[in-house]
Image (spheres, rainbow, N blue to C red):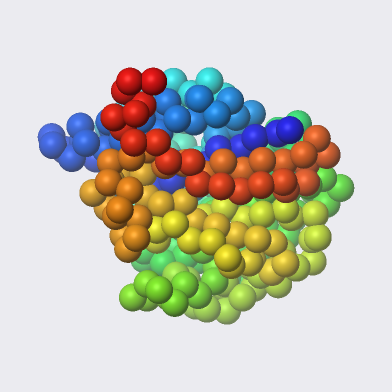
């Protein structure tokens, strides 16, 4: 079995009060992830709250406590240049100035990080050129099972006030069309909407959203999690085929005494 653990939307600020709360939440999520013995940890964006250098230093200090390699894809609140600077020594970070895309391998599985961050907007961006970038990564990995990760979910979520999270909805539909051309895509992991979302697909592939890691920013039913640590546990069989997806939640009080 191959296990991937997802974190998302840590929104770490460098502001007294909120800084301590959200760093503590990230530390608990890291502890929970470590207890699950993953081969890789993925973070689906909004690592920092305002994209400042000092925020990434705080995030990195906690993420480096993971017992497994990790990758992060930019969210709308992230700064690509400062993220690249903070994690520049890690193999998934390139030296470019554009979208931060990458492919990393974990056993029989390839993990594709697709940067859906838009320009001067909180919404996602995946125009024709960006979809061709995604297609190129999927073409490189067409002979391997793939877990695709991005910040913005490319499907309508009726339960939220704004159900469409892309600047132009043709961008989201285009992502689904691209994924449909690659049956090896096993699942699509997303963040951004600060809720636990399941039951949707991106093209043919099942997709899910992990609740926000910052407890004060959780929305909808995810508020009921309180300050509990929550991660997504994504299991694959020995050939890299999706086996199980489940939300793992541990109250902070239980973590502290375990």
Q: Is residue 154 visible?
A: yes
Residue sitting at x 65%, y 61%: 206
Where residue 101 appears, as percent x and y from the top left, is 59, 47
Q: What percent of the width, then of the height, locates residue 83? A: 42, 38
Residue pictured at 64% horizontal, 29% vertical:
39
| Relative to 179, residue 72 above or below | above
Residue 12 appears in the figure: no
Q: Residue at x 58, y 65 (%)?
A: 199
Quarter holding the C terminus is top left
Residue farthest along the left direction in this orientation:
16
**In which quadrant will I find the N terminus?**
top right
> Which residue is situated farthest in the right direction here?
143
Left/right placement of residue 20 relative to residue 157 reads left
Question: Disc count in the image?
Answer: 0
Taking 134 as reference, is 143 above or below it? Answer: above
Foreground residue among 173 and 258: 258
């Amino acid at each position: 079995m191959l296990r991937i653990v997802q974190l998302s939307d840590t929104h770490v600020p460098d502001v007294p009060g909120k800084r301590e709360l959200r760093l503590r939440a990230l530390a608990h999520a890291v502890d929970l992830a470590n207890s699950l013995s993953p081969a890789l940890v993925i973070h689906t964006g909004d690592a920092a709250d305002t994209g400042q250098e000092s925020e990434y230093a705080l995030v990195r200090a906690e993420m480096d406590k993971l017992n497994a390699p990790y990758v992060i894809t930019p969210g709308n609140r992230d700064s690509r240049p400062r993220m690249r600077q903070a994690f520049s020594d890690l193999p998934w970070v390139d030296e470019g100035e554009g979208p931060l895309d990458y492919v990393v391998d974990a056993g029989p599985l390839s993990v594709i990080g697709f940067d859906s961050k838009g320009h001067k907007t909180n919404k996602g961006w995946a125009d024709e050129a960006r979809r061709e970038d995604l297609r190129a990564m999927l073409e490189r990995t067409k002979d391997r099972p793939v877990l695709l990760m991005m910040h913005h979910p490319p499907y309508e979520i009726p339960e939220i006030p704004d159900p469409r999270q892309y600047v132009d909805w043709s961008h989201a539909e285009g992502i689904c069309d691209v994924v449909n051309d690659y049956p090896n895509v096993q699942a699509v992991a997303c963040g951004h909407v600060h809720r636990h979302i399941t039951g949707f697909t991106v093209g043919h592939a099942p997709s899910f959203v992990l609740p926000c890691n910052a407890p004060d920013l959780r929305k909808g039913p995810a508020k009921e999690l309180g300050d509990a640590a929550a991660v997504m546990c994504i299991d694959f069989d020995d050939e890299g085929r999706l086996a199980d997806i489940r939300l793992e939640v541990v109250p902070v009080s239980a973590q502290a005494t375990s």
